Image (cartoon, rainbow, N blue to C red):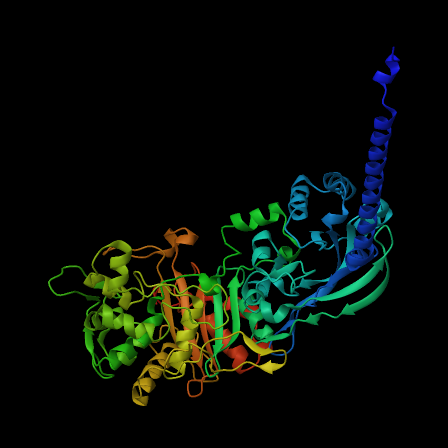
C-alpha cells in the first residue's frame, strides 16, 4: 500500500514554483532598481538646469527697481511737481504663510482705523505679478517704521522700502492744471505694461500728470540679490538700472498763476491767460482749488467726502469743464461773422429804441439800457454792448451761418492740445436741437444766441482761445501746456490745429479792435473805470451770464437774489492792441456785471504780464472792487 504523503506532496512541483517566484522577484527588484536609477539620471542630468535654477531661487531673487518720475517745472524753472523721499509698507504675498493673520497683526501694530484697515486689505489682494510687492501703506512716520523694525521677525514677506513720493509745493494753486498721481488701481493694472511698471505704485490720474504719463514715468530696472533663509538681502549680484522719466517744462508762469488765484480771492471762478503768437498757456486757474498732495498717498474717506459735499465744488475744474453762457463777450466775434458773411458793414447803423422785435411778433427783446442807445454802428455796439444791434445781426445771419462762423473760433469743440479732460461745451445748431429735443429751431432762440445766452455754453479755456484767435486776426495757434520735454522744445505747429479764418481785411479787424479798445477807454465804454491809467493799448469785452431767465418785463435786481442766483461776471481781453502778447478770459461766478469785477481782474493780469507782476497790489484791487459798483448789470 502506497504512502498517503506521496499523494499529498510533490517536491518537484514545489521546487519549480519556488524558482519561478524567485525569478519574478529578482526581475521586479531589477526593474525597480532600473527605474530608480533612471529617475536619478533624469533628475541629476536631464533636469539639472531646472532644479539648479529652483535651488538658486531659494537664495537669489530678482527685485524690480522703479524709475524716478520726471520733474515738472514752470517756464522759468520753478518746481511745480517734485519727488520727496519717503518710506512705504509693501507685501509680497508669495512669502506670507498666513495672510489674514499677518494683516490682523499689522492693523493692530499700526493702530489703523476701520476704514484704513479695509483699504489695507483691498490693496493686499490687488492683482500683482508673482513676487512683486504690493503697496499697503505710503509715507510711514518714524514711529510706525520703528514698530515694524522691532517686529520684523514676525512679518515674513512684509518690507519697508524707501521710495520717492510725488509732492506739489503749491498744490492748491496748481491742482487743476497739473493734476496729480495716485496709487495704481486694479482696473489700471489690467491695461499697464507690467514689465515697465514693475515696482511702481503710482500713476498719473488727471491733468498734465495723466496726459504726459508716458514721458514722466520712465522704465523700470531690475537687480539680482542673494538672500538668507529669512529673505534678508545679503548682497547684490547684478543690476539693470532704471531709466528715469523725462523732466517736463510747462508754459505756465508760476507768478502769473499765483496772481490769478489770489485775484479770485476765494470766489468760484476761473482765469485763463494765453500767449496768442505761440499758444502757450500762461495761467490756467480754477478756484477754489484743493490740496492734491492728499490724493498721492490716498485721501481718507472723511476728507474726500468733505470735498465732494462742498457746495463750491473744489474738485471741479472750471477752467476746462465749467460751462457758462458767454454773454456779451461774443459780440466782437459776431461782428466779424456779420462782416465775413456780408450782412453788415463797419459803418452800417441801426436805431435802437431799447428793444428788438421779430417780424409779426409782439414780444420785445430788450436792450440792457431800457431807453436804448439811439443810433448805433458796429464800433459803438461793441463799446456800449448794445443788445439790439446783435439781435438784429443774429436774425440776419441765421443760426446756421452763426454756428459755422463761431465754430471757426473754436466754440463748441475741444481746443487744447495737451489739456486732459477738457469739455467741448456747446455751440448750438439746428441739427443739435432736433437730435437733443426732437424739436425745430425757433427764430427767438437765434436772438438769444446773438447775445451769448440761450443754449450757448463756453469754457474759460475756449473763451481765452477764441480771444487769442481774434488777437491774431484769425490765425490759429493751438493752446498747449508743455514747453520742453526732456530739454527739447515742443513744436508750435501742433497736429489738428484748425485752419485760419478766411478774413483777409485789416480794416475790418482794425474797426473791431477799436470798438474793443473803447470798451475800456471810450467815454461810453462799459468797462471805462477799469481802463483808467492804462499804460498800453488794450481791447476787451465784458459779459454777463444769466443763472436764470427773466420774464419779458422783469428787471434784474441782484440785492433781492440769493448770492448763488446772481449773474456770472465775464471779461475777455488782449494787449497790447498793436502786438498782442497776452489774451485773457475771466469768469467769476455770481459776481454780477462783467464790466466791474471780471474786468478789473483781467486788467490786473495784463498789467502783471506786460509791466511787472510785483507791481500788482491785490489788496488795493480788492478795495477798488468794493468801491466800484460798475455801470449796468448785464454788460
The C terminus - image quarter: bottom left
- Which residue occupies the foreground of this view, 630 or 129? 129
x and y, in percent, of residue 489 in the image = 57, 82
Q: Which corner quadrant of the image does residue 184 belong to? A: bottom right
620 left or right, relative to 198: left
Instruction: Report the number of numbered marks.
Output: 0
**Residue at the farthest left position:** 360
**Residue at the farthest front position:** 1
199 left or right, relative to 143: left
Question: Can I make out residue 288 in this image?
Answer: yes
Q: Residue at x 31, y 60 (%)?
A: 455
x and y, in percent, of residue 12 in the image = 86, 27
Q: Residue at x 82, y 34 (%)?
A: 20
Question: Can I make out residue 53 in this image?
Answer: no
426 left or right, relative to 316: left
Q: Which corner quadrant of the image does residue 112 belong to? A: top right
209 left or right, relative to 331: right
- Which residue occupies the foreground of this view, 231 or 248? 231
Q: Which corner quadrant of the image does residue 168 belong to? A: bottom right
x and y, in percent, of residue 59 in the image = 84, 56
x and y, in percent, of residue 483 in the image = 56, 78
- Which residue occupies the foreground of this view, 193 or 76? 193
Q: In the figure, 611 relative to 95: above or below?
A: below
Amino acid at each position: 500500500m502506497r504512502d498517503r504523503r506521496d499523494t499529498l506532496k510533490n517536491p518537484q512541483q514545489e521546487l519549480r514554483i519556488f524558482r519561478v517566484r524567485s525569478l519574478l522577484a529578482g526581475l521586479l527588484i531589477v526593474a525597480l532598481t532600473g527605474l530608480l536609477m533612471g529617475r536619478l539620471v533624469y533628475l541629476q542630468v536631464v533636469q539639472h538646469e531646472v532644479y539648479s535654477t529652483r535651488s538658486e531661487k531659494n537664495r537669489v531673487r530678482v527685485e524690480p527697481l522703479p524709475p524716478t518720475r520726471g520733474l515738472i517745472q514752470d517756464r522759468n524753472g520753478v518746481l511745480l511737481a517734485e519727488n520727496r523721499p519717503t518710506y512705504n509698507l509693501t507685501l509680497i504675498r508669495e512669502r506670507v504663510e498666513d495672510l489674514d493673520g499677518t494683516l490682523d497683526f499689522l492693523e493692530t501694530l499700526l493702530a489703523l482705523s476701520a476704514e484704513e484697515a479695509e483699504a489695507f486689505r483691498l490693496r493686499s489682494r490687488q492683482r500683482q505679478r508673482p513676487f512683486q510687492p504690493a503697496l499697503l501703506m505710503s509715507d510711514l512716520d518714524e514711529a510706525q517704521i520703528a514698530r515694524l523694525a522691532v517686529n520684523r521677525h514676525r512679518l515674513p514677506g512684509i518690507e519697508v522700502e524707501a521710495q520717492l513720493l510725488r509732492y506739489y509745493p503749491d498744490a492748491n494753486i496748481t491742482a487743476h492744471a497739473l493734476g496729480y498721481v495716485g496709487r495704481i488701481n486694479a482696473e489700471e493694472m489690467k491695461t499697464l505694461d507690467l514689465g515697465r511698471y514693475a515696482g511702481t505704485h503710482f500713476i498719473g490720474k488727471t491733468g498734465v500728470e495723466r496726459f504726459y504719463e508716458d514721458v514722466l514715468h520712465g522704465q523700470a530696472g531690475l537687480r539680482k540679490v542673494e538672500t538668507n533663509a529669512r529673505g534678508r538681502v545679503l548682497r547684490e549680484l547684478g543690476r539693470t538700472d532704471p531709466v528715469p522719466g523725462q523732466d517736463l517744462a510747462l508754459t505756465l508762469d508760476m507768478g502769473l498763476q499765483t496772481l490769478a488765484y489770489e485775484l479770485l480771492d476765494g470766489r468760484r471762478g476761473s482765469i485763463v491767460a494765453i500767449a496768442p503768437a505761440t499758444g502757450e498757456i500762461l495761467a490756467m486757474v480754477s478756484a477754489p482749488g484743493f490740496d492734491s498732495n492728499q490724493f498721492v498717498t490716498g485721501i481718507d474717506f472723511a476728507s474726500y467726502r468733505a470735498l465732494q459735499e462742498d457746495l463750491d465744488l473744489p474738485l471741479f475744474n472750471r477752467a476746462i469743464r465749467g460751462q457758462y453762457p458767454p454773454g456779451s463777450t461774443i459780440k466782437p466775434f459776431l461782428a466779424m461773422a456779420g462782416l465775413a458773411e456780408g450782412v453788415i458793414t463797419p459803418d452800417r447803423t441801426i436805431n435802437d429804441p431799447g428793444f428788438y422785435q421779430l417780424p409779426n411778433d409782439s414780444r420785445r427783446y430788450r436792450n440792457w439800457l431800457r431807453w436804448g442807445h439811439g443810433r448805433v454802428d458796429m464800433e459803438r455796439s461793441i463799446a456800449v454792448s448794445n443788445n439790439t444791434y446783435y439781435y438784429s445781426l443774429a436774425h440776419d445771419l441765421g443760426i446756421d451761418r452763426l454756428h459755422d462762423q463761431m465754430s471757426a473760433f473754436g466754440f463748441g469743440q475741444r481746443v487744447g492740445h495737451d489739456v486732459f479732460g477738457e469739455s467741448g461745451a456747446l455751440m448750438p445748431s439746428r441739427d443739435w436741437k432736433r437730435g437733443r429735443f426732437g424739436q425745430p429751431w425757433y427764430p427767438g432762440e437765434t436772438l438769444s444766441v446773438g447775445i451769448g445766452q440761450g443754449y450757448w455754453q463756453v469754457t474759460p479755456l475756449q473763451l481765452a482761445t477764441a480771444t487769442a484767435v481774434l488777437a491774431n486776426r484769425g490765425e490759429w495757434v493751438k493752446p498747449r501746456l508743455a514747453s520742453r520735454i526732456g530739454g527739447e522744445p515742443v513744436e508750435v505747429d501742433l497736429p489738428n490745429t484748425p485752419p485760419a479764418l478766411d478774413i483777409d481785411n485789416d480794416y475790418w479787424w482794425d474797426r473791431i479792435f477799436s470798438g474793443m479798445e473803447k470798451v475800456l477807454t471810450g467815454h461810453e465804454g462799459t468797462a471805462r473805470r477799469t481802463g483808467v491809467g492804462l499804460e498800453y493799448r488794450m481791447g476787451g469785452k465784458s459779459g454777463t451770464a444769466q443763472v436764470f431767465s427773466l420774464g419779458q418785463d422783469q428787471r434784474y435786481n441782484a440785492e433781492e437774489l440769493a448770492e448763488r442766483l446772481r449773474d456770472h461776471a465775464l471779461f475777455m481781453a488782449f494787449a497790447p492792441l498793436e502786438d498782442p502778447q497776452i489774451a485773457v478770459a475771466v469768469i467769476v461766478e455770481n459776481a454780477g456785471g462783467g464790466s466791474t469785477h471780471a474786468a478789473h481782474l483781467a486788467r490786473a493780469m495784463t498789467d502783471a504780464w506786460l509791466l511787472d507782476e510785483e507791481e500788482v497790489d491785490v489788496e488795493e484791487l480788492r478795495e477798488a472792487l468794493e468801491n466800484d459798483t460798475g455801470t449796468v448789470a448785464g454788460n
